[in-house]
Amino acid sequence: MPSGKPANDDATPLFAGPHHLSGRTLEVSSLVDLKLNDKEVILSFDDGPIPGRTDKVLAILDQFGVKGAFMMVGEMAEMHPALARKVAMEGNAIGSHTYDHANLTSLSFDAAMDEVLKGELAVTKATGTDVSFFRFPYLAESQRLRAAIAMRDMVVMDVDIDSKDYFTSTPLSVTQRTMNLLHKRGRGIVLMHDIHKRTARMLPTLLSKLEAEGYKVVTLKFKKPQVPNDLVASADFIATR
Ligand SMILES: [Zn+2]
């Protein structure tokens, strides 16, 4: 134990402002709009919401003046609707992540779509907002599912930078791994998990590092497409018939 430091593991250190980590707001209607410039990142958090952890992540994002994208599991949102609503009310992008974190590639197409829709409905109900983003659990996907989800006006969130925050490691090593990947790519969607206690613990270290290196956190917003995506798809279909 280092001397002179209180042994309070749960204390959230205060990172008093002013901060300059917040970047532009990017409005997307489909995946093609999701284009980041150099030194831009999107912070995404999967598998929540869960009391005592997601709210800590929210407090840290707020301290740094940035927003995230929360890919909620339907079942979790259903269990913790007040917290799910708080995530949405604070201006974060809301996505779903199936109803109970199923591996969709192990199900039939119809059963997989049922999972997707059940998850979307549960998150919509809990947050009181439209659910415009989707992430595949385990990143297990198929072309057919991807197309069907896009037709429902949901933007599939890919992962560019995996923080691997699910491994037991120190905040510094998670930050270093994430920064190394970012240095190679220059930009990207960072994957984290708000269900882990250690994610909130490492977040201030990561955000401080991003800020010190001049990165900007992009706020993601869904913009309803002028022409619904399914009409575009069916028009394409008719045109190519
Ligand atoms: Zn997940």
Image (cartoon, rainbow, N blue to C red):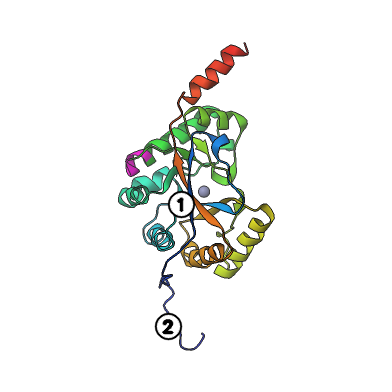
**Magenta run includes residue 127:** yes
Q: Position of residue 232 (x, y in %)?
A: 52, 21
Q: In the image shown, does 3 or 208 lie closer to the viewer? A: 208
Q: Quadrant of residue 241?
A: top right
Indicate which disc, 1 or 2, sits on the residue closer to the N terminus.
2
- Residues packed near mark 2 inside 10 Å, few (<14), some (14 to 19) or many (20 plus): few
Q: Quadrant of residue 172?
A: bottom right
Q: What residue lies at 35% left-to-right and 45% top-to-bottom?
A: 78
Q: Position of residue 44 (x, y in %)?
A: 50, 51
Q: Position of residue 101 (x, y in %)?
A: 49, 44
**Magenta run includes residue 129:** no
- Residues packed near mark 1 inside 10 Å, few (<14), some (14 to 19) or many (20 plus): many
Q: Which residues are magenta?
A: 124-128
Q: What residue lies at 55% left-to-right and 34% top-to-bottom?
A: 107
- Helix, strand or loop status at disc 2: loop
Q: Which of the two discs, 1 and 2, sits closer to the camera? A: 1
In this rendering, position of residue 65 left or right of residue 206: left
- Helix, strand or loop status at disc 1: loop
The residue identified by callout 2 is 6
Does the image show residue 49? Answer: yes
Q: State whether label 2 is within 8 Å of ligand 1.
A: no
Q: Tell me the CA gap for discs 1 and 2.
A: 30 Å
The residue identified by callout 1 is 68
Q: State whether label 1 is within 8 Å of ligand 1.
A: no
Residue type at mark 2 is Pro
